[in-house]
Amino acid sequence: MKATITDVAKKAGVSMKTVSRVLNNEPNVAEKTRAHVKAIAAELRYTPNLAARGLATSKSYLIALIYDNPSINYISHIQRGAIDACREAGYHLVVEPLYLEKVKSRAEKADAMRMVLEKLPVDGVILTPPLCDSQGVLQTLSELRIKCVRVAPRNRGQQPFVGMDDDTAAYQMTQYLLEQGHKRIGFIKGHVGHAATDMRYDGYCRAIESGGLSVSEQLVFQGDFSFESGVVQAKKLLELPVSERPTAIFASNDDMAAAVISVASQMGLDVPADLSVCGFDDTPLARNLSPALTTVRQPIYKMGFKAAQQLIDPDGDQQKIGQILDFEIMLRDTVSNLKN
Amino acid sequence: MKATITDVAKKAGVSMKTVSRVLNNEPNVAEKTRAHVKAIAAELRYTPNLAARGLATSKSYLIALIYDNPSINYISHIQRGAIDACREAGYHLVVEPLYLEKVKSRAEKADAMRMVLEKLPVDGVILTPPLCDSQGVLQTLSELRIKCVRVAPRNRGQQPFVGMDDDTAAYQMTQYLLEQGHKRIGFIKGHVGHAATDMRYDGYCRAIESGGLSVSEQLVFQGDFSFESGVVQAKKLLELPVSERPTAIFASNDDMAAAVISVASQMGLDVPADLSVCGFDDTPLARNLSPALTTVRQPIYKMGFKAAQQLIDPDGDQQKIGQILDFEIMLRDTVSNLKN
DNA sequence: TCCAAAGGTGACAGCGCTGTCAAACTCATT
DNA sequence: AATGAGTTTGACAGCGCTGTCACCTTTGGA
């Protein structure tokens, strides 16, 4: 049978309350007592009953990761990070997919969120795109008084968030392309409505313009982060007459970049000799593609980790509402230098 | 404030216990009372407090999915299936990675498992390969009296399991290759120690032999399910003199199959014209590869679903200890017919 | 020496729910 | 009308823990 706090208290010759204090690292326990209780607890292999503790404190020691159909790779790294942070603090992660793509109205989204959360007592919620941008969802969370951290590219209101600077990353990548001598740089946008979609596009535009060029509508197409959409838009870009055809294509994520490469090679274009390509995310795919894809590495694992950490201990070393983590430009083999 | 069972009881003019009975679909409540209580509960947006219920019943309504470094794709489908099954039954899924690869001794594995489970009160555990084959882990589970379902290719002892017939799948795939006229069929084995590794190999051998051929050691190499190992072993196979080189390679999973294709194309061999390739798992990768990979589709989602279901309701419609789900051979573009 | 403040400890209630068991009510049968 | 079996209901304890508050120590200063 599992040991209870009473067992420990009896064996240690102290009250339950003292044991409780020791277990929760509360002050006002003599060092000697503390050590003794700890020893007994270890000996008895005692671990607190979460349900009981939860009932008494109205905390659940559970954090929910809620997501809506993101890429498997993305979500699993977030998840790993969050789990690791939870472990350190004795929390656990429950995972709740919530498919809202087809749900249009704000009220309906709010309701769906409510359904999930009313059934599950969690101390905090990690929200990933696109959920983190739904006002309905955010509103439900605040009505339910549930803490939440958004894994999102930018702050909205005063919600805590963890993210990276998509704008600057896209800016730097575009600038890199410019430095390699590319003038006609195609761009495939991400899913409409995702905040990252806009930020990446903004970064691209800023770089193009700061390079003294102007953004050509002809070279920008709307994708939706899927491989399939990448295929469709890549075809449009590559079927342009040679003199107008881009010498480089910047896809808003790796899947679409992979699609570009695939279309290019079907059309007999060599990457990177005839066409440079870069992506965004640095999924495992990027490395396994041949040639290996030049892309932006997001600190996804770390975002999950920090998000959970902030939920568990909001006054940790970082007092700030939001945290911007560093990205990394992964220079690989899909971009050629036009100047050589 | 959240409504409690007492609120509902008062408003409905019955005792808490009656409300409790209604909520849990217990018998011996007059239909009229039942309906009335249900209405009030809905009106008050009442949802039971899981911690309290857990404390009273010593159930947690939590199921753990524990895994050790499997492929992301694999685990996320299992996870999805399990979550969906949990939702139907008011359960929740907590995810616990447990990295044991470097841990050799059985006792240490058992201890690691114990650490995780002692902290977390779960009603059941889903174990994926390779954890489901560790005696240490299994033993801990039984000592702790925690129900578990193994997502595994074959039964071991009397543990409940959910799986597919890897052996037959590999047999059928190999036979298909044989039917296409291939005589020299290379095989790249999976990670040593995974049960699936052996079963897939067995299926391959059976088919080869039943085709009147014999398994040549020269054509069988040991991989470990990783892309990298696939590269290494593919090279060995493809560097064989042309007369001995296989006309087809059956890799034990898609990642290694992708590696084979990559190596082949680097060596100037066309797939499928010069070399047929097939894999196992039908990951998304398989479809995105060009040419699209012929492979075996595992019912991964369904395995997760059934596993959770069995944990939640062990006497569901399936009384049996184990369930074997159907696979599907996905014929795509990487196998050519030598007879034409 | 005495007193206040701070440090250390324990008794006890109660978190929201369900299990147990006894009470009250129904209805068909003698 | 009385009996018994079955159905429906409720009172109450208690799951294992922590918050509150009161009590008993110590300590340091007047």
Image (tube, coloured by chain):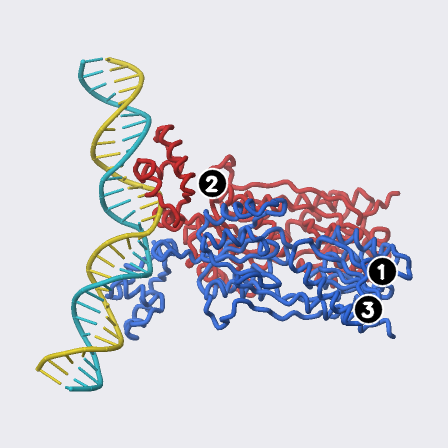
Chain colours: A red, B blue, C cyan, D yellow
Q: Position of residue A108 (x, y in %)?
A: 48, 63
Q: Is residue A233 visible?
A: no
Q: Quadrant of residue A161?
A: top right
- The tag earlier along the polypeptide, 2 or 1, is 1
Q: Amino acid at mark 3?
A: Leu
Q: Position of residue B135 (x, y in %)?
A: 56, 53
Task: Give the Cα distance between marks 2 and 1.
Answer: 57 Å
Residue topped by disc 3? B213
Q: Tell me, yes or no, whether dots 2 and 3 are on the same chain.
A: no
Task: Give the Cα distance between marks 3 and 1.
Answer: 55 Å
Residue topped by disc 2? A313
Residue topped by disc 1? A241
A332 and B110: which is toward the camera: B110
Residue drawn at the location 71% of the way across and 66% of the way down: B203
Q: Position of residue A219 (x, y in %)?
A: 76, 56
Contact? badges 2 and 3 (CB < 8 Å): no
Residue drawn at the location 63% of the way across and 56% of the way down: A71
